[in-house]
C-alpha cells in the first residue's frame, strides 16, 4: 500500500513495437494483415532464431490501443533478446524452449502493464527441416490447419497470459505437410457482429476452406474480407469494404468491428536437399 506522503512513480512512456519484418523461408510462405481500432492491441511478429527456425507470435492485448501496443513493444523486445539465446543450444528441445520463452513473455506483460493485463496469444516455433511447429495457445481462439484431410483445430491450451506471474504452458507439436496452411486470427475477427450475431469460428473455417490459391497473403486477405462482408450486411453495399479493406484497415467508427488480425503460414515444400559431392 502506498502512503499519502509517498510520491507516485513516473509512468512508463508509451512505446510502439518496431515494424515487423515478414521472413523469407524457402519452404514457407508467410503473410499477415490487420484492422486497427482505438480499443485493443492486436500484434504479430516473426523472428528467425536459427537456420530454418522461425518464431511466430500473434497476441491480443486487452485495453486502450496505445497502452496495449506499449506492452506489445516490451513483449517484442523480450522475444528478440531472449529468443536467439534459448534456441541456440546444440541440444535444443523446441517445445521446452517455447514453454520457457512463453513464461518470460507472460512476466514481461505483467511488468510492462504494471499489473494484470489479459493477453491471449498463439506463439510457436516452426522447424523448416522437420515441417513441424511447436506451439502454445494460451487463451487464444483456436488456430486452424488446412490440409488435404480437411481443417483441424489447434485448441486453447491454457489461461491467457498476463494474469498469473508463474503460470506455465506446455508446448504441443503439430506437423505441417507440404501444402498445409496454418491460419491464425484474433478474437476481434471472430467477434465481429451484425445485428447482435457474431461472425464466429464456423464462418472462419468456411472462409479458410474456400480461400483461393495457396498464397498466404490471399488467405489473410480473404479471412478479413469475409468478416467485413459479414458486418456489411444491411449497410450500403461496398461502404465498409471500400473504406477499410486493405493492407492496413483502420477507423474509430466501425460499427460491429473491433481490432482484428489474421496470419497465415503456408508450408510450400520440404526444405531443399543439400547437394552432395560424389
Image (cartoon, rainbow, N blue to C red):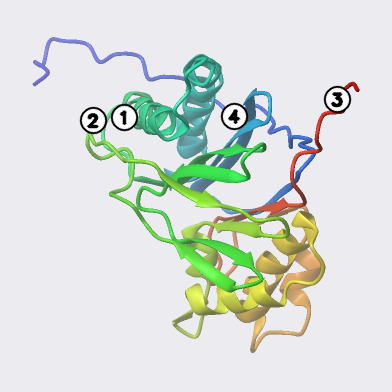
**Residue 110 shows which numbered tag?**
1
Q: Nearer the viewer, mark 3 or mark 2?
A: 3
Give the distance between the C-alpha atoms of the residues marked 3 and 2, in whole angstroms: 50 Å
- Report the residue marked by disc 3: 276
**Residue 165 shows which numbered tag?**
2
Give the distance between the C-alpha atoms of the residues marked 1 and 2, in whole angstroms: 7 Å
Give the distance between the C-alpha atoms of the residues marked 1 and 4, in whole angstroms: 17 Å
Helix, strand or loop under label 1: helix
Mark 4 crowd level (few <14, some 14–19, many ≥20, 10 Å Cα): some
Q: Position of residue 132 (x, y in %)?
A: 57, 45
Give whichever of 2, 99 is nearer the camera: 99
Q: Position of residue 3 (x, y in %)?
A: 8, 15
In the image: residue 166, left or right of residue 230: left
| Nearest to N terminus: mark 4 or mark 3 | 4
55 above or below 277? below
**Residue situated furthest front in the rendering:** 278
174 above or below 245? above
Q: Are marks 1 and 2 in contact (CB under 8 Å)?
A: yes
- Report the residue marked by disc 4: 17
Q: Are marks 1 and 3 in contact (CB under 8 Å)?
A: no
Q: Name the residue located 22 percent from the left edge and 36 percent from the top edge.
A: 164
Amino acid at each position: 500500500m502506498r502512503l499519502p506522503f509517498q510520491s507516485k512513480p513516473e509512468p512508463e512512456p508509451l512505446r510502439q513495437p518496431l515494424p515487423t519484418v515478414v521472413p523469407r523461408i524457402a519452404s514457407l510462405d508467410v503473410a499477415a494483415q490487420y484492422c486497427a481500432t482505438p480499443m485493443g492491441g492486436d500484434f504479430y511478429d516473426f523472428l528467425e532464431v536459427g537456420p530454418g527456425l522461425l518464431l511466430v507470435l500473434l497476441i491480443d492485448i486487452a485495453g486502450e490501443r496505445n497502452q496495449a501496443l506499449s506492452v506489445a513493444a516490451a513483449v517484442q523486445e523480450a522475444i528478440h533478446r531472449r529468443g536467439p539465446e534459448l534456441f541456440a543450444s546444440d541440444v535444443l528441445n523446441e517445445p521446452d524452449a517455447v514453454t520457457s520463452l512463453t513464461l518470460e513473455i507472460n512476466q514481461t506483460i505483467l511488468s510492462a502493464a504494471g499489473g494484470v493485463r489479459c493477453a491471449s496469444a498463439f506463439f510457436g516455433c516452426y522447424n523448416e527441416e522437420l515441417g513441424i511447429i511447436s506451439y502454445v495457445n494460451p487463451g487464444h481462439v483456436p488456430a486452424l490447419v488446412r490440409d488435404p484431410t480437411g481443417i483441424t483445430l489447434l485448441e486453447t491450451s491454457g489461461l491467457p497470459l498476463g494474469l498469473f506471474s508463474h503460470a506455465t504452458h506446455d508446448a504441443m507439436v503439430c506437423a505441417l505437410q507440404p501444402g498445409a496452411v496454418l491460419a491464425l486470427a484474433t478474437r476481434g475477427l471472430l467477434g465481429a457482429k451484425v445485428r447482435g450475431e457474431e461472425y464466429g469460428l464456423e464462418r472462419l473455417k468456411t472462409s479458410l476452406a474456400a480461400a483461393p490459391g495457396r498464397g498466404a497473403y490471399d488467405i489473410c486477405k480473404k479471412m478479413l474480407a469475409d468478416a467485413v462482408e459479414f458486418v456489411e450486411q444491411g449497410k450500403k453495399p461496398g461502404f465498409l469494404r471500400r473504406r477499410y479493406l486493405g493492407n492496413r484497415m483502420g477507423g474509430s467508427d466501425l460499427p460491429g468491428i473491433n481490432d482484428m488480425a489474421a496470419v497465415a503460414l503456408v508450408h510450400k515444400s520440404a526444405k531443399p536437399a543439400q547437394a552432395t559431392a560424389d
